[in-house]
Image (cartoon, rainbow, N blue to C red):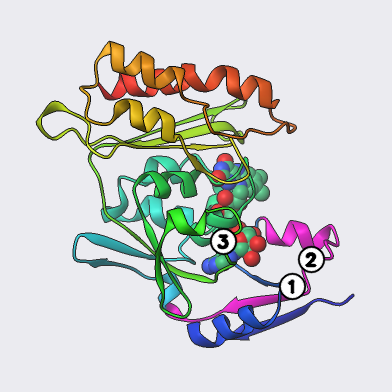
Amino acid sequence: MPIEVRTHATLAETARAFAASRGAHILGGGTVLMRAVNAADPSVATILRPADPVLRQIRTEGREIAIGAGVTMAEIIAHRELGFLAPVARLVGGPQVRTTATIGGNLFAAAPYGDVAGALLALGASVVTGEGRRMPLDDLFRPHAPRAFVATILVAPSRDFHFVKVSRVRPKGVSVMSIAANLPRPGGRLQDPRIVFNGMGARPMRAVAAERALSGQPLDAATIARAASLAAEGLAPEDDAIASAWYRREVAPVHLRRLLEGAA
Ligand SMILES: Cc1cc2nc3c(=O)[nH]c(=O)nc-3n(C[C@H](O)[C@H](O)[C@H](O)COP(=O)(O)OP(=O)(O)OC[C@H]3O[C@@H](n4cnc5c(N)ncnc54)[C@H](O)[C@@H]3O)c2cc1C
């Protein structure tokens, strides 16, 4: 079957074309999508190339930074206001991948990809769809959430953000898992902590049980031990070529404990 490739000048046109066909895929950098095309994946019937300049922009909106979905990892690393995300983007693939891979594409790249998506979820980011609808990333990642064309990602910088990527090949190996955490501690106690594992399920997932164990507590040895023991609760790791589900469950508490000790 030939694949149709269409370019749309505006977000609204792209959103309409995306909604009209289940086989329509958005072209970001193509690092994942073009592999599917080369493998003759029958689910790719139409490729939409959104050409609206908004997709390439990075701008400040009040407390938040609005990042166009077509902004690449290399552009994130180079941008002065995005220093908090740069350490995550720097660990995505090698230089060639980072030059083309987009932040929007990372939201939809299947596990174990999705390191930046996990970081954004931990930071409580939201997305704005091509139709102009804002929604928390939590909703986009819910099981059975409707598919969406993402135009912009909105995220507030945080000084309390921590990230660790666990891979077998350094520095650019694919994740066994990555952990992103936002751990604000006004007055010395954790308030609304968010911990996200990537690689422990089909999409980045919040470690809700560990978050509960941390909430309202000081980040001391007893709290860290309790949260680490709950690291994998409610998560659903899978076997893949990188690691088995069993291995991921075994090492998740160790890596969460190390991250929390580093943040304390
Ligand atoms: C060698 C290699 C190493 C990699 N290493 C890592 C890694 O270490 N960590 C990691 O996280 N990822 C990694 N990746 C995965 C991936 O390249 C990137 O994470 C990337 O961000 C995907 O972006 P893209 O722009 O290339 O997406 P594309 O390939 O263009 O698209 C991927 C999917 O996202 C959808 N999509 C894209 N943009 C949008 C949008 N705006 N709205 C809705 N849907 C959209 C597409 O329809 C498609 O289904 C690696 C990939 C390769 C090839």
Q: Which residue is mark 1?
A: 23
The x and y percentages for residue 3 are 81, 76
Question: At numbered mark 1, what does the secondary structure look like: helix, strand or loop?
Answer: loop
Which quarter of the picture shows residue 159?
Answer: top left
Q: Residues within 10 Å of mark 1 (few under 14, many from 20)?
A: some
Indicate whether residue 205 is drawn in magenta. no
Q: Is residue 116 left or right of residue 67?
A: right
The x and y percentages for residue 212 are 35, 31
Cα–Cα gap, marks 3 and 2: 18 Å
Cα–Cα gap, marks 2 and 1: 6 Å
Q: Is residue 76 left or right of residue 239?
A: left
| Amino acid found under the numbered disc labelled 1 | Gly
Residue 145's tag is 3
Q: Which residue is mark 2?
A: 43
- Is residue 234 visible in the rendered structure shown here? yes
Question: At numbered mark 3, what does the secondary structure look like: helix, strand or loop?
Answer: loop
Q: Which stretch appears magenta?
A: 32-53
Q: Are marks 1 and 3 in contact (CB under 8 Å)?
A: no
